[in-house]
Image: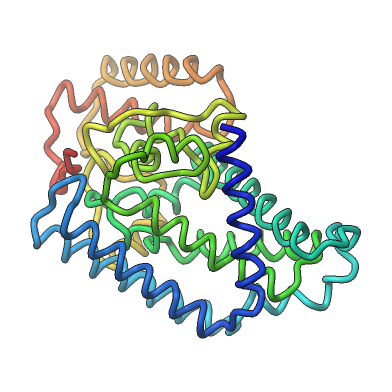
Amino acid sequence: MSSEITSLITLVESYLVWLSGMSGKLATLTLFIAFVVLAALELNNPKCRLTLKQSRQSYQTNVGLFVFNSLIISLLSATPLLMMANPNSDSGLLSYVVNPVWKALLSFLLLDLLLYWWHKASHSFDGLWMFHKVHHNDPYLNVSTAFRLHIVELTILTVVKSAYIVILGITQSMVLINEALLTLFIMFHHTNISFRGEQRLGKVIIVPYLHRAHHSTERKEHDNNYGAVFSLWDRLFGTLAELEPKEIGIKGSSPQTVFGLIKFGFTPDYPAPVYELDPNLTSMIAEAAYYKAEKRAFKPGNELRDWLEAKREILRIVYGDQSNKQRPTPC
């Protein structure tokens, strides 16, 4: 384990030295080539078999959402993160680190830790999950799912990253390196593949089988494996789950088009069927919601989500699942 981590750090250091001279255009080209390679791998030898129609639907929606988000962000600023970098690079916390390689490595590790807690918060609070569920509603997990983000979540995340850049004093070159590496790792762990040595590699970084569990339809399964790059944080904070999900996506009916997803992000949760509830059903729902809250030790932030999940489960038992137009994908 320690030798694997040491080897990975050495590898990352060597890449950081090379990447420090990389231009934005070269980084974009590198990521595009990586996307094409990963897409080819999952199309030729997928872990979960998808029809051509399913793959096309997912790719079209995810690429369309990426283009929409890119246009909106570019209207705000062409390079919002890079603009925050150099003016504050001499006054941040990392200005005390002399060695540029270790400074870059620390900035990447701290960014990954920040994203772990951000991701966990997106699952813990209804106001954040409302937008983050757009990412989870893809029933056909693949490399393009990495770009399935709601514009509001992306905007908030950009603000969070900007604060991190200012506080630590990250330079523009480090921002470019961090974003390029981060995007590469996120594309990789969303890829619909499985390979020899995957579990061994998963002891160090987030690999597809770990992130696939995070996209399970079951909440007790998808509320795990929050890491973006290193699996260290999930192991350290007790949120690592090594399992194979039965279904991918979210429960219930939800849109699968670009503008449908944008609207979907502004709904508190995916809607439950509308029925006239009698007092007995209301009581059953309240008891089920209380049980869910009790299982998570009554931690605040998920009250609405507990109630809606309990309501769906009770109504499904009583009336059947009449609203599930888009069924999650078995894997």
Which residue is drawn at the image coordinates 63% and 76% (left, top)?
A: 80
Which residue is drawn at the image coordinates 54% and 68% (left, top)?
A: 180
Quadrant assignment, res 52: bottom left
Tag count = 0
Q: Position of residue 132 (x, y in %)?
A: 44, 51
Q: Nearer the viewer, residue 131 or 232?
A: 232
On screen, residue 137 versus residue 129, left or right, reads left
Q: How is the image coloured?
A: rainbow
Instruction: Please say if 172 is above or below 268.
Output: below
Q: Quadrant of the N terminus?
A: top right
Quadrant assignment, res 243: top left
Q: Position of residue 249 (x, y in %)?
A: 27, 44
Instruction: Please say if 298 is above or below 33.
Output: above
Q: Nearer the viewer, residue 135 or 320?
A: 135
Q: Position of residue 23 (x, y in %)?
A: 59, 83
Q: Quadrant of the C terminus?
A: top left
On screen, residue 162 versus residue 254, left or right, reads right
Which residue is drawn at the image coordinates 69% and 69% (left, top)?
A: 174
Instruction: Please say if 136 is above or below 301.
Output: below
Q: Position of residue 19 (x, y in %)?
A: 61, 72
Q: Nearer the viewer, residue 217 or 43?
A: 43
Quadrant assignment, res 149: bottom left
Which residue is drawn at the image coordinates 27% and 33% (left, top)?
A: 245
